[in-house]
Image (cartoon, rainbow, N blue to C red):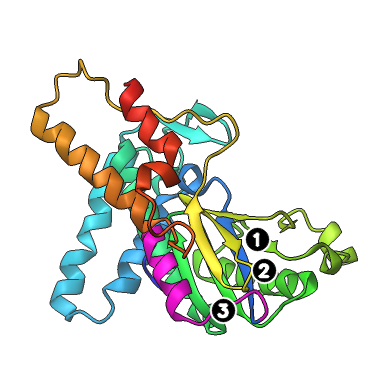
Amino acid sequence: MSKTTIQASNLKENLENQGVTCNNSTMASTGAEDFHPLARLKPVTNTVCHFSKEQSEEDQMAIKHCPDLNKFGMQSTPLAFVDKNHECDSDRDPEEKVLTIGEHESAWLADLAGACVLDNTKSHFRKTKCCNPCRDDGTAVFNNKLSCDDMLKWTTKFQNSVNRPVGGNCPQFTCSVWTDKSRTKSANEQNNPKTSVETGNFFPCPDAELVWATDGNPQLRLHLKPKQQLKCLNADSIHTKACFKTISSGVHKRLSELTTFTETNKKLPLDKILPQHFQAPQHA
């Protein structure tokens, strides 16, 4: 549970092996609002201490110097991202600054802090059949059919548990629950902007969407956003032939891992099941 990124294909495997049906489970997704832009050095430092507490005393002393190097870099950063703008805040405490050390390094450090959040909130996922986090989003399958009020209470308790180790109310988590229309009437839910209800025929999750089959079993399929255009490397690109070949085989493997095969489509070629994804390389 302390991992922040688990492949969407793992969710498909868990759904198929955990006996999940529409009658014994509740699908929900959680998300941290502005997680990466709001990540600061202080929770990252606390995270390093958290995950190194079982190391030897000598190793812990050496590990504690790593955040000091980041702090030195933050002290020499004159601009910082505040709310929605960059501002000059060279006088601010480096530990309270938003991470601006470099796009990839900042994202990695923010993920590290997110792993600490998950590690400190394991108890909230004990009554789930599976949980599939992906950076600042995640999909969880809860045991039994839960109401909107049940999920609202869960979200509130989860947020309180998140606030304690980070020493504040950032990040703020939202929760979206997939249920039928007959169970959405809840006064509490309507008054909570952090909780929403999905009543459509499918439930979006990272890279894919979930649907219920006629027998009540879950199925995974590729998800396309409205007006989304699939793009591939142009044939005139300087990439080598070997690279193009690897991309093609990798994409095909990924598509098959995110598609549930049934009696209806198991004998069909993949390009017939997912025509849009195979047309994109041809147009490129």
At mark 3, the secondary structure is helix
Q: Position of residue 185 (x, y in %)?
A: 88, 65
- Circles 2 and 1, Cβ within 8 Å, touching? The answer is yes
Quadrant of res 61: bottom left
Other-residue count near label 2 (Cα within 10 Å), few / some / many at <14 / 14–19 / ≥20: many
Q: CA distance from mark 2 to mark 1?
A: 7 Å
Q: Is residue 85 left or right of residue 155?
A: left
Would you name the residue on which mark 3 appears? Answer: 124
Q: CA distance from mark 3 to mark 1?
A: 13 Å
Q: Nearer the viewer, residue 54 or 115?
A: 115
Kindly tell me whether residue 5 is visible in this rendering.
no
Other-residue count near label 3 (Cα within 10 Å), few / some / many at <14 / 14–19 / ≥20: some
At mark 1, the secondary structure is strand
Q: Nearer the viewer, residue 214 or 172?
A: 214
Would you name the residue on which mark 1 appears? Answer: 175
Say whether disc 3 or disc 1 marks the residue closer to the N-terminus.
Answer: 3
Say whether disc 2 or disc 3 marks the residue closer to the N-terminus.
Answer: 3
